Amino acid sequence: MRLSADWMVGADDRILEYLSEEGPATPSAMAKDDRMRFSRTHINQRCIKLADYGFLVNLGNGVYQITEQGEKYLAEELDAETVEKLNGEGEGTASA
């Protein structure tokens, strides 16, 4: 069972799963996929939030890629509640 954080919403798991399976993509491309039942605007907002916590990285031009930390969350190897918000660049870190 994945352990999500209080700041996470249902769309977050779908976004992470999509990027894990399909590779880097834009919120527009994700919104066009039948598996994603969220608007481009909502997906974009959630990608920004997921990047804030190091689950995604913005590659530029609105293209997002899942990080190792995001993959660990999907694999149930990381409790998202232990992840701290990033203040700068790089991946978020899990606290002990």
Image (tube, rainbow, N blue to C red):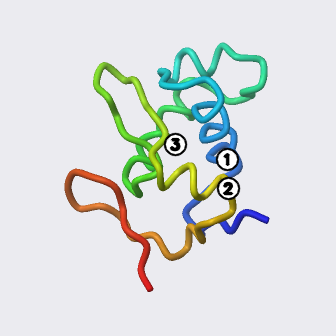
Q: Which residue is drawn at 32% across and 29% down?
A: 59
In contact (CB < 8 Å): disc 2 and disc 1: no
Q: In this view, does 61 lie to the left or right of 69?
A: left
What's the distance in space between the residues labelled 3 and 2, CA to CA? 20 Å
Q: Name the residue under label 1.
A: 13
Q: Compared with residue 3, is residue 31 higher up or lower down, i.e. above or below? A: above
Instruction: Check residue 46 in the rendering and tell me which mark sits there, or answer none.
Output: 3
In contact (CB < 8 Å): disc 3 and disc 2: no
Which quadrant holds the N terminus?
Answer: bottom right
Name the amino acid type tagged 2.
Answer: Ala
Instruction: Check residue 4 in the rendering and tell me which mark sits there, or answer none.
Output: none
Name the amino acid type tagged 3.
Answer: Arg
Which quadrant holds the C terminus?
Answer: bottom left
Q: Residue at x 50, y 21 (%)?
A: 25
Quarter of the image for residue 48 reads: top left
Name the amino acid type tagged 1.
Answer: Asp
